[in-house]
Amino acid sequence: MPALRGMVLYYNAGSPQEGSRAKAVFAAHRLRIKNITPEELGRSVGSFTGLLPAGEAPAGEPIPESMMVFSGVRGRELDQVLSALLRAGVPRAVYKAVVTPGNAGWDFYRLYEELRRERAAVEGAPAPEEAP
């Protein structure tokens, strides 16, 4: 069996079909998949990749949109995965990020809010209000 090349932290707030399509792409690109549950959204993204110790996190509300957070996937390989997701019918609107030293300590709520602000800035829309 070929070695895994990276990992994706996947929180699916979409349909089961969206999740199945995304997971098929991840498997085809030999990415390890860590399904993130609503109870895990308060943990730092770095705690799932080994960059930070896993700690207890308060359970919060589910995030209303899907998120994919990649670790160990860069450049051309990441471009190939993103293109394959589109070809598989995974909505472009799914939030995507790469774990960095700057965001490894963030929980999924903070990362989600940052991604929402960035998308609003790119689209020229007013910044969304922060979720409670």
Image (spheres, rainbow, N blue to C red):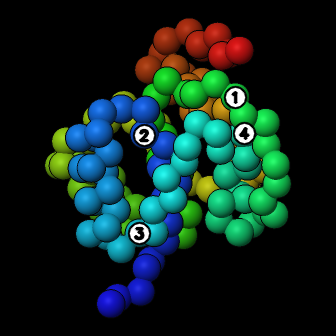
Which callout, 2 or 4, points at the residue further toward the start of the chain?
A: 2
Pointers 4 and 1 in contact (CB under 8 A)? yes
Task: Inspect the image, locate mark 4, and give the three-letter code of the amino acid beneath it.
Answer: Gly
The CA span between labels 4 and 3 is: 23 Å
Residue at position x 27%, y 59% in the image: 25
Task: Inspect the image, locate mark 1, and give the three-letter code of the amino acid beneath it.
Answer: Gly
Residue at position x 65%, y 65% in the image: 49
Q: Which residue is mark 4?
A: 42
Badge 3 density bin: few <14, some 14–19, many ≥20, Cα 10 Å: many
The CA span between labels 1 and 2 is: 16 Å
Pointers 4 and 3 in contact (CB under 8 A)? no
Badge 1 density bin: few <14, some 14–19, many ≥20, Cα 10 Å: few
Q: Which residue is mark 1?
A: 60
Residue at position x 82%, y 54% in the image: 55
Front tag of 3 and 1: 1
Q: Is residue 81 left or right of residue 125?
A: left
Which callout, 1 or 2, points at the residue further toward the start of the chain?
A: 2
State the SS at label 2: loop
Q: Which residue is mark 3?
A: 31
Which callout, 4 or 3, points at the residue further toward the start of the chain?
A: 3
State the SS at label 4: loop
Q: Say which quadrant the C terminus sits in.
A: top right
Look at the image and tell me whether residue 97 can be seen: no
The CA span between labels 3 and 1 is: 27 Å
Task: Inspect the image, locate mark 3, and give the three-letter code of the amino acid beneath it.
Answer: Leu
Pointers 2 and 4 in contact (CB under 8 A)? no
The CA span between labels 4 and 1 is: 7 Å
State the SS at label 1: loop
State the SS at label 3: strand
Residue 79 vs 30, above or below: the answer is: above
Q: Which residue is mark 2?
A: 12
